[in-house]
Image: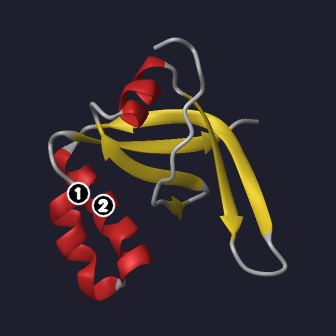
Amino acid sequence: MDGWPLVAPVWFVVEDGVLLFNTGKETAKGRAARRDARLAISVDVEEPPYAFVQVQGTATISEDPDELVRSAMAIGSRYMGADRAEEFGRRNGVPVSCSCACSRRR
């Protein structure tokens, strides 16, 4: 609320060139994305030769229940494996969540 940027780790997937993550609507990330749609996201590789990419873009926020479950399943599959995707989708794709799609700034 005081204008400081927020930095927080997120699980994500990239779909059609758009970085997608879910977060709680009332978390610091959710409130910040709704207040100001500009996002900066950094992804690093934690093993040699160490690398990173930074994405600056604009968030499009969805609270559609079907999209929340679908995106949570895709993200869960990436991090926990396809066999646990539905479990994570049902747990994380809930009405108090929002899905943030970060489209790259041109």
Residue 28 position by quadrant: top left
Q: What residue do we see at 52% from left, 26% from top?
A: 37
Q: Residue 105 in the image: x percent, y percent?
A: 71, 36
In the image, 49 versus 25, the foreground residue is: 49
Does residue 103 appear left or right of residue 89 in this picture? Answer: right
* Circle on res. 54: none
In contact (CB < 8 Å): disc 1 and disc 2: yes
Q: Residue at x 84, y 79 (%)?
A: 49
Q: Amino acid at mark 1?
A: Asn
> Which structural element holds mark 2?
helix
Please give the label number shown on residue 72.
2
Residue visible at 45% across and 26% down in the picture: 32
Say what amino acid the circle numbered 2 marks: Ala
Viewer-proximal residue among 25 and 4: 4
Task: Answer with left or right where residue 8 lies relative to residue 50.
Answer: left
The residue beneath circle 1 is 92
Determine which quarter of the picture holds residue 102: top right
The C terminus appears in which quarter of the rendering? top right
